[in-house]
Amino acid sequence: MVYLDNAASSQKPDCVIEALAEYYKEHNSNVHRGVYALAEEAELLYHDARKTIADWFNVSSEEIIFVRGATEGLNLVAQSFSQSYLNPGDSIILTQMEHHANIVPWQMVAKQRGVEIQVVSILKDGSLDLDELNSLLAQQKTKVLSLCHISNSLGTINPVEQIIEEAHSHDVHVIVDGAQSVPHGKLDLKAMNCDFFTFSGHKVFGPMGIGVLYGKKEILESLPPYQGGGDMIDEVSFSGTTYAPTPQRFEAGTPNVSGAIGLATAIDYLRQHDMNELARHENEPKLEKLLYKLFMILPAEASNSKTRFMENRLWFSELSKSAKLKMNTFGNRQGLIQIQHDFCRNFHQGCVRCELPRLLED
């Protein structure tokens, strides 16, 4: 099987699947509640999972919040941050290359708080208009910049370190959507110096329904909870409630313990590999050549309708002609992501099957 839809969701290695099964067979219990042996085992595994992920990104465990995915991470930041830091008349900066998960939450906040959204344009080469971005950052009303690290549609890799430095010089907080960047390299979030960073586990070989929101501890401690109930409390009474410290205050209800364990296992899986070598593999010319061959083979195998076959053959032919241009414009990795996106959008299915021996000829 050749699977081209990793930008949407990745397949899972055996170690992740086995870790999930082992948890449910050997350690299944709720956390933060019981004092019996099984509960303590689950608590320790959950704690260790958080530490594994924090170490991978060079941050503190207290700065790692488990969420359902990047979408929930962005919603959490938008709602909690806006309550403490945004006032009517303030401005939020987004970019034209954002996934809607990094647009809609801010539109909701804009309506709730009476703030403005400003959008940075994309240049013809697929990059952000940094001059326009810097001009918007310099406006006194600008308080937040939320942008993707790598575009899910264009594959553009934004120079986030440079952007964050410029934003911070104007006292603008920066949220980075890392859903597409985490699978492609080891990131040092402390060095990146973003205020928030979020990603989904299922795009980085982990389970669905689990993700991470990183936030600087001093900022997290200043934010109100996103949701109430469960173990995000310190003390509860009808006269008032006090909240647990971060990260617990942002993890209301029974957490996805198995998901956290599975995600930590996926991170350990990445740790076993040379990320630089993986990046070189992504840019391997032979991989590019195989992809071109794949496009020319698939329509005949994927369609039983002669009419549909001819339509797809023509479309793939045009796609293969433009593929080299996209490689040259964005670089191999970004070009491959763009071609993959075009393919999946046209063909309406996330995985592709063909015979590898045929692709490997020549």
Image (tube, grey):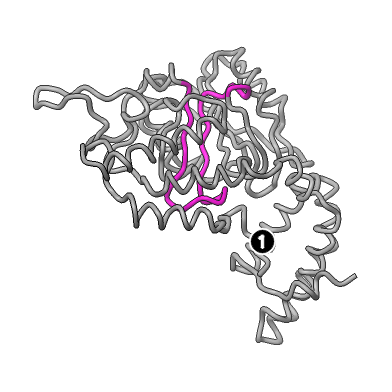
Q: Nearer the viewer, residue 208 or 104?
A: 208
Relative horizontal placement of residue 171, taking residue 76 as reference (left or right): right
Image coordinates for residue 362, horizontal then vertical, percent: 90, 70
Residue at (65% x, 40% y) in the render: 150
Q: Amino acid at mark 1?
A: Leu
In this rendering, the answer to whether 307 lies above or below 315 is: below
Question: Residue at label 1?
Answer: 4
Image coordinates for residue 119, horizontal then vertical, percent: 59, 33
Image coordinates for residue 42, horizontal then vertical, percent: 33, 43
Q: Nearer the viewer, residue 195 or 171?
A: 195
Relative horizontal placement of residue 165, taking residue 329 as reference (left or right): left
Q: Which residues are magenta?
A: 190-216
Residue 205 part of the magenta-drawn span: yes
Relative horizontal placement of residue 74, taking residue 158 as reference (left or right): left
Res 229 visible = yes
Residue 53 part of the magenta-drawn span: no
